[in-house]
Amino acid sequence: MILKQSLTMSSALALVMLILTFHKASTELFTALADMEELLETEAVLIANLDNYIRVQEDKLNQLRRKSAEYQREHTEAAKDVGTYLSNPVNAFLLTKRLTTDWREVENLMSYDVGSDFLENVTNYRDVLKFPSDEDLNGAAVALMRLQDTYKLDTASVARGELNGIQYSTEMTAGDCFELGRQTYLNGDYYHTVLWMREAMDRLSQEVNRTTTKADVLEYLAFSTFKQGNVHTALLMTNELLELVPDHERAVGNKVYYEKELEKEAKQKALRGDDGSVDVPVDTTTKIRTSTSNPHVYDSSERKLYEQLCRGEAERSVAETSKLKCRYVTNKSPFLKIAPLKLEEANLKPYIVIYHDVISEAEMELVKRLAKPRFRRATVQNYKTGELEVANYRISKSAWLKDHEHPYIKAIGERVEDMTGLTMSTAEELQVVNYGIGGHYEPHFDFARREETNAFKSLGTGNRIATVLFYMSDVTQGGATVFPSLRLALWPKKGAAAFWFNLHASGQGDYSTRHAACPVLTGTKWVSNKWIHERGQEFRRPCELKPDHPEEF
């Protein structure tokens, strides 16, 4: 009874403390590492709960062991001379007592489920702690595949916890690899399913304590291999699965189907040029799209260059980089005459620069602290409707901060005005962004193109003339800002800010400013954006006598 009362009190107290400490979580935790950090707190609470569960189970067993040892001693003593033992009226009374009241207490202790309170805790924790959803699990798997493709990571190396040759974590089990492959399978990504199921199979053969089964791996591996077009190998794997599980319903059906497909292939081979003739039908149904009206769809050549830049492989010529300079600038600002800015030229046309040490540690910490409670999945503007919507090509969470919320926010806006020479009266609020697992933003424009007639319409301040991007963290690996058409990569440096004009002086969009945020491979990436609009800049950046945009406009 003492044990039971102690358990109830401790469980109730723990739950009350959690309700006071935590709040219920939203989903999409994988889109921001700031949210993912709270999952470690959830895990710590669950581990403590599990430890307490084990402790009370051990206490219960120890009580039962003591009772058993006590009864065994008396029973052994009685067995030496039953007549003499029972002739003692005290012994007779104690034997009767042991088999009545004492044994009832033992029965009660045996039947009492000491773990129920802790199991109930786990259920209650789901209302007060952040728990990842199935969507988060799938999002994390997709992010890992994105990183694997972008940075050309070897499957076996990732499974060993190595990223670009650096050991970051413990090795994955066969079960971990299987689950990763299963998640990609659910997304119809059979290429990665095959990679990770093969890795699961390799690891399974080395495991003493198996974390998955060969049959489960073969089921997914065989079908994914078939979906990749390799029917023969899929059939071999299915036959191997049927040797392990002869009555596997899906495998039995697939075996019949694969055999028919192989028969069809054999007949088609005999009919189509097997004798060396060239009269083989040509596929005229597949069309390669060379252009698109969607600014977020890009061709394979841009994708290839984007990924090369992310990996740091696309280098610029010496002729280009030799013209770039670093200097102190005042930008005709009276304040900057006593505190000039450190400017590094990154590109001359369009003019892209990096200002170093332009935001303090205290300012960055405050911005992060104000933004965290307001984080929402980052959105993009639909190029047809102008409406904001989430998209899988932008994985991050963002929040918006107004100048009046804190003197630091206002000071950052004033500093941007000194840096750019542009008025902040029509600029957007400061957007704060934290990138999650494999967080990225694929190639896009910051300005609205001519056909995007609804973009920024509600603001009434014209197009985005310029962008200032503050880097509020160093990133261990990945996370560069890249401009594919310029072969330019800007690597995050805490306290620095990148600045460029999105529009020509004529007001036409500068398409060479199309840029992307590379996936974060390791570390965390915090940035903040200040998007500056056209209205009010007429005399600060006037049109030139002749249009400065390309002739096609």
Image (cartoon, rainbow, N blue to C red):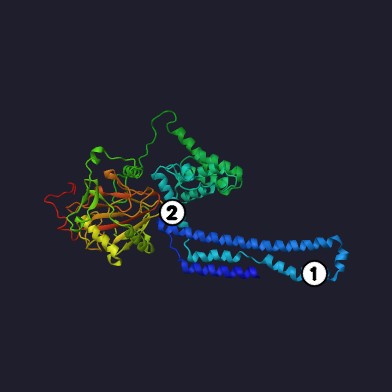
Image point (62%, 71%), residue name: 5
Residue bearing mark 1:
94
Q: Closer to the N terminus: mark 1 or mark 2?
A: 1
Residue positioned most to the top: 276
In the picture shown, does residue 220 fall above or below 64? above
Dividing the picture into quadrants, the one containing residue 459 is bottom left
Which kind of residue does numbered mark 1 sit on?
Answer: Leu
In the picture shown, does residue 409 fall above or below 487? below
Which kind of residue does numbered mark 2 sit on?
Answer: Gly
The crowding category of the residue bearing disc 2, from other C-alpha atoms within 10 Å (few below 14, some 14 to 19, many at least 20), is many
Mark carried by residue 526: none
Residue sitting nearer the eye, 91 or 338: 338
Residue sitting nearer the eye, 76 or 196: 76
Residue positioned most to the front: 338
Judged by depth in the image, the label closer to the viewer, 1 or 2, is: 1
Looking at the rendered structure, the secondary structure element under dot 2 is helix
Q: Quick check: can you spot residue 521? A: yes
The percent coordinates of residue 185 (x first, y second) are: 47, 49
Quadrant, the N terminus: bottom right
Residue sitting nearer the eye, 30 or 236: 30
The crowding category of the residue bearing disc 1, from other C-alpha atoms within 10 Å (few below 14, some 14 to 19, many at least 20), is some
Image point (71%, 62%), residue name: 66
Residue bearing mark 2:
139
Residue positioned most to the left: 545
The percent coordinates of residue 383 (x first, y second) are: 29, 56
Q: CA distance from mark 1 to mark 2?
A: 65 Å
The percent coordinates of residue 198 (x first, y second) are: 51, 42
In the drawing, does residue 236 fall left or right of residue 311? right
Residue sitting nearer the eye, 307 or 62: 62
Looking at the rendered structure, the secondary structure element under dot 1 is helix
Dividing the picture into quadrants, the one containing residue 287 is top left
